[in-house]
Amino acid sequence: MDTLLVRDERPIDIPLISELTRLAFQNHPFSQHTEQFIISELRDAGALSVSLVAELDGKVAGHIAFSPLAISDGTSGWYGLGPVSVQPERQRMGIGSRLVEAGLSRVKDIGGRGCALVGDPAYYGRFGFMNRPGLVHAGIPQEVFLALSLEPPSDAGFPTGTVGFHAAFLARPPAWGGLFAAMASCPRDLERG
Ligand SMILES: CC(C)(COP(=O)(O)OP(=O)(O)OC[C@H]1O[C@@H](n2cnc3c(N)ncnc32)[C@H](O)[C@@H]1OP(=O)(O)O)[C@@H](O)C(=O)NCCC(=O)NCCS
């Protein structure tokens, strides 16, 4: 692979992150296609705790987000991993793995004690994520709700209870998006009144 750099997001990356996230999830079977709005709302809420981009030959090709979790047993310092996206034509080149590894390391650096996510065990298992029967998320099938402790030994102090992601995960497309779409399709004579 050519030169891959994983770094913090910069303001200039924001529209690129949005677009690459939209494209990456475009054909995802379980996506509600709101991932780019989730990232924006997390950012606006000051809850985008870690936001890294993968730059391939100077161009943004991937992104990963982490945000704080609430756990019903009161455990603090846990973060939700996601969304994570790699440009469709750059997938399966190791970029996603580099983002996950760099992101987990950064979460540790900021004092993170663990991470949880909703995802495929076949993919996230390679980073140590596992389903933990005592840690649940309402409405999410248990087998795809995965967690990783960042504290050694990994079983010590593993939280139990119900996990809540930040409210930004309920994000929907901005209402004015629909308004602009309606204006764009408006016949010219109607626009003139
Ligand atoms: C998931 C994603 C971030 C992985 O990034 P990537 O750069 O393609 O992944 P990597 O190259 O590091 O790893 C590729 C490996 O992961 C596997 N893989 C990739 N996406 C997978 C998925 N969704 N489920 C299971 N395995 C997956 C590939 O089969 C490949 O396996 P191999 O190493 O045995 O060949 C990327 O495919 C993507 O953006 N997908 C669309 C958005 C998405 O699904 N995000 C995650 C939601 S939970």
Image: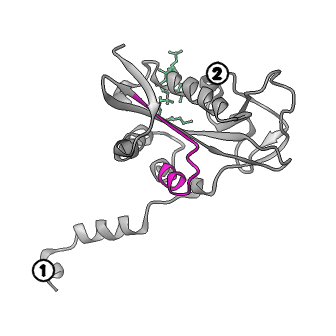
Pick the quarter of the image with the C terminus: bottom left
Percent of width and height locating residue 161: 84, 45
Q: Give the side of residue 151 with respect to residue 83, left or right.
A: right
- Residue 50 colored in magenta in the image: yes
Q: Is residue 118 above or below residue 177?
A: above
Closer to the N terminus: mark 1 or mark 2?
2
Could you tell me the amino acid type at mark 1? Asp
Where, by quadrant of the figure, is residue 77 drawn? top right
Q: Is residue 64 above or below residue 173?
A: above
Q: Disc count in the image?
A: 2
Regarding mark 2 in the picture, which secondary structure is present there?
helix
Pick the quarter of the image with the N terminus: top left
User: Which dot marks residue 189?
Assistant: 1
- Give the spatial CA distance, label 1 vs label 2: 58 Å
Residue annotated with mark 2: 127
Percent of width and height locating residue 151: 77, 26
Residue drawn at x 36%, y 64% is 177
Magenta part of the chain: 38-54
Kindly check if marks 1 and 2 are in contact, taking CB atoms under 8 A apart as contact: no
Q: Is residue 5 above or below residue 69?
A: above
Regarding mark 1 in the picture, which secondary structure is present there?
helix
Could you tell me the amino acid type at mark 2? Phe
